[in-house]
Image: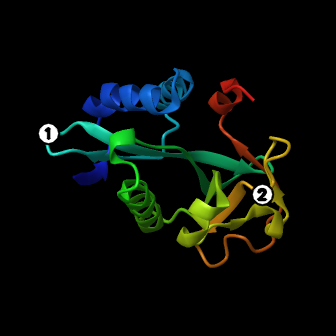
Amino acid sequence: MLIRVEIPVDAAGIAKLLRKVFGGNDEADLIQQLREDGLITLGVVATDDHGGIIGYAAFSPVMVNGEDRQWVGLAPLAVAEKYQGQGIGKALVYEGLDTLNEFSYCAVAVLGDPGYYAPFGFKSAAEHNLHCKWQGMESAFQIYSLADDALIGVSGLVEYSAPFDQLPA
């Protein structure tokens, strides 16, 4: 297995993985739209020994109260069923966080299972008076600070890019 930054030739394999893992086109269409709009800050893939895509993590810009603060959102994160439970998702997230840190991004938002993301250091966004637009997701909305001062004096609405609005509620 190899973890690396996505390259253009990976697009078809990423779309196939997302369709299979999520059981439909929504996430694949989301990534295609983000890619077309130039809104993928970082894409990280896991490949098998033959170069096939078996895992993917995408990071795209988010705004805080309409302001660009060099924050990104992690979504989607996917690992092929056959490879789940082997630490591939964790490796993708860690690689993404390390790379974003190297490029001086300040924070990462995620909407997901706190039990999964807490070991990485994600904290409840609500603890910092931050929220997303999706009602009832307060416990799942989390923030990871890449910079020591990323959360100082920041509160309010964290907004994902417009293509996320096309996902079903």
Residue 63's spot in the image, x, y percent? 70, 48
Is residue 73 visible in the rendered structure shown here? yes
Identity of the residue drawn at 85% across and 64% down: 129
Which is more N-terminal, label 1 or label 2?
A: 1
- Amino acid beneath label 1: His
User: Which residue in the protein does label 2 denote?
Assistant: 139
Q: What element carries label 2?
A: loop
Residue, x 31% and y 41% (percent of image)?
54
Task: Residue 80: tell me if it is visible.
Answer: no
Observer-nearest of 77 and 40: 77
SS state under label 1? loop
| Residue for point 53% across, 29% down | 27
Left or right placement of residue 49 versus residue 59 in this view: left
Query: In the current view of this chain or complex, which residue is farthest to the left?
Result: 50
- Front in this rendered view, residue 136 or 157: 136
Which residue does the image show at 53% across and 62% down from the upper left?
105
Tell me the crowding category of disc 1: few under 14, some 14 to 19, or many 20 or more residues within 10 angstroms, Cα based: few
**Total of numbered circles in the picture?**
2
- Observer-nearest of 24 and 146: 24
For the C terminus, the quadrant is top right
| Amino acid residing under circle 2 | Ser
**Neighbour class for label 2 at 10 Å: few (<14), some, many (≥20)?**
some
What residue did someone put label 1 on? 50
Residue 26 at what x, y percent from top left?
57, 24
Relative vertical location of residue 73 with respect to residue 121 in this rendering, above or below: above
